[in-house]
Image (cartoon, grey):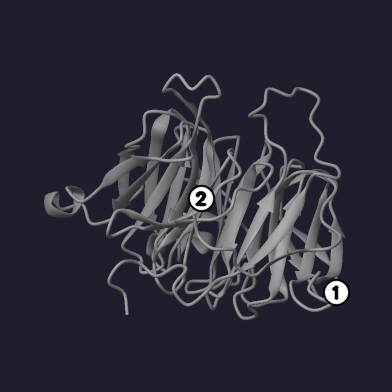
Amino acid sequence: MAPPAIQHELANPPSDAISSLEFAPNSPTRLLVASWDKNVYLYETHGEEEGGKLIQKYEHRAPVLDVCFGADDNEAFTAGMDWQVKKLNLATGEQTVLSAHTAPVKSVVYSRERSILASASWDSTLHIHSFATPSTSSTTISLPAKPHSLSITGSKLVVAMASRLLHIYELESFSSLASMSNGAAMDIQPWQKRESSLKFMTRAVACMPNDAGYATSSIEGRVAVEWFDPSAESQARKYAFKCHRQPAPENDGTDIVYPVNALAFHPIHGSFASGGGDGVVALWDAVAKRRIRQYQKYNLSIAALSFSSDGKYLAVGVCPGFEDGTEDYTGEGNTKIFIRELSETDAKGKGQK
């Protein structure tokens, strides 16, 4: 168990479950949080005697399922149960509907390198917006199954779906789409089609910051690490491991297995954090295949994780899950956001200088 680190809890948390959170691309102390309480929250994570400060709250018509920053610290995009993908001006509060799916929108990610926004909906489609072209219409790409999670790098988009399916798209193929499609559906084939290494439903996917590969997690306490390079040599490096399991109270040698809800890669060291329904956050060395450290257990399920752009802070979203079999769900009063300050060695893998 890692020694106690510097950590503080943000004041004025959401009143219902956290769906996602993300640090700003330029400011390491500015954090966006999306919640089922129909709001997006913008925090300054430090100051106010280390309870942070709620800068602004942006109300939506329905629960917000995902949020990400755009080109700078004042632009954001949201996805939600109202089926809409919106651009949010964080300075003025202005909301602009970019496109509408035909079912709730689960995920939204933005590539600053290519000015491309991708959203994934439970209607089994992707909407691709290319802001590098004058066209404001989106391109629709059909998926073979319902998407559960998205992750993006400087060159690739990874879509994790139901039925253990995974598609990898090259962003270069999206760049000229908007002007060609004018909002129509396009038959864009992924660069690679894969099946998950994990036997159970995918919960999260996160890409490596060096654009070499990705990690996926499942509802059955496992994480897999894979590389994009399709060569046999590179594919032989992929592996999976058990995690986020706690001994059963009966002490009969069995484990209680928890879903791994969240994954996030450290922007500098390339290690990654996982957060589970057991309330545990662990840091892993993806290359050395070992756990670096595990933090003190939180009292409720880990819903979301995000590293700051400088790698010095880890935001942890904590709220009740369904692990205890509770049917009358409420996140009110139980939803918390912790900001953990990382030491110089917290996220460093074995042998890193």
The reply to whether residue 135 is in sight is: yes
Q: Residue at x 37, y 50 (%)?
A: 168
- Count of marks placed on residues: 2
**Amino acid identity at mark 1:** Thr
Separation of marks 2 and 1 at Cα, in angstroms: 28 Å
Q: Residue at x 40, y 63 (%)?
A: 271
Q: Could you say which is closer to the camera, residue 62 or residue 267?
A: 267
* Residue type pointed to by label 2: Leu
Query: Hey, which quadrant is residue 86 in on the image?
Result: bottom right
The residue singled out by tag 2 in the image is 150
Rendered position, 157 above or below 51: above
- Quarter of the image with the C terminus is bottom left
Quick one: label 1, few (<14), some, or many (20+) residues within 10 Å?
few
Residue 171, how many percent across, how many down? 41, 62
Locate residue 224, reporting x and y percent. Answer: 35, 44
Secondary structure beneath disc 2? strand
**Nearer to me, 311 or 120:** 311
Above or below 104: residue 128: below
Q: Which residue is mark 1?
A: 92
